[in-house]
Amino acid sequence: MSVATNPVLHTLNGHTNNVRSVAFSPDGKSVASGSADASIKIWDFDNGIHMTLIGHESTVRTVTYSPDGFKLVSGSHDDTVKIWRAKNGVLLE
């Protein structure tokens, strides 16, 4: 039995430590990643750029989008959960 191979669609480079979590936006146009470098990146497939969200003090263990895609929530080893505006990376307080 042979296994069909599919080409890699995208390789997203930019974190400086292990990536711990990834999530597709509900519309499939972007991906968020959380890393042991304490940052979150939102990768936009339409324009090919990413934005870096800084606010955690330790490894970002999980990221996920709200069902409507307007917010991103992250959890970290710094014992915090943060909610961000997905469109511009603003930390919501």
Image (cartoon, helix red, strand yellow):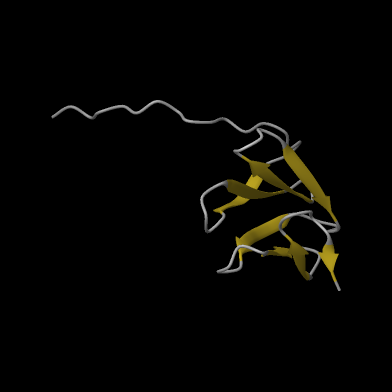
Question: Outermost residue toward the front?
Answer: 46
Report the side of 71 relative to 90 (left or right).
left
- Counting every numbered tag in the picture gives 0
Question: Outermost residue toward the bottom?
Answer: 93
Q: Up-down: is 79 above or below 14?
A: below
x and y, in percent, of residue 38 in the image: 79, 51
Residue at horizontal 79%, vertical 45%?
A: 52
Q: Up-down: is 12 above or below 27?
A: above
Residue at horizontal 86%, vertical 58%?
A: 55
Task: Depth check: give the residue in front, 41 or 2.
Answer: 41
Task: Depth check: give the residue in front, 31 or 35.
Answer: 31
The quadrant of the picture occupied by the N terminus is: top left
Report the side of 64 relative to 9 (left or right).
right
x and y, in percent, of residue 65 in the image: 61, 63
The quadrant of the picture occupied by the C terminus is: bottom right
Task: Depth check: give the residue in front, 88 or 52.
Answer: 88
Report the side of 63 relative to 79 (left or right).
left
Task: Depth check: give the residue in front, 29 or 42.
Answer: 29
Q: Quadrant of residue 70?
A: bottom right
x and y, in percent, of residue 23 in the image: 56, 54
Question: Outermost residue toward the left?
Answer: 1
x and y, in percent, of residue 72 in the image: 68, 63
Q: Up-down: is 34 above or below 48?
A: below
Residue at horizontal 66%, vertical 42%?
A: 43
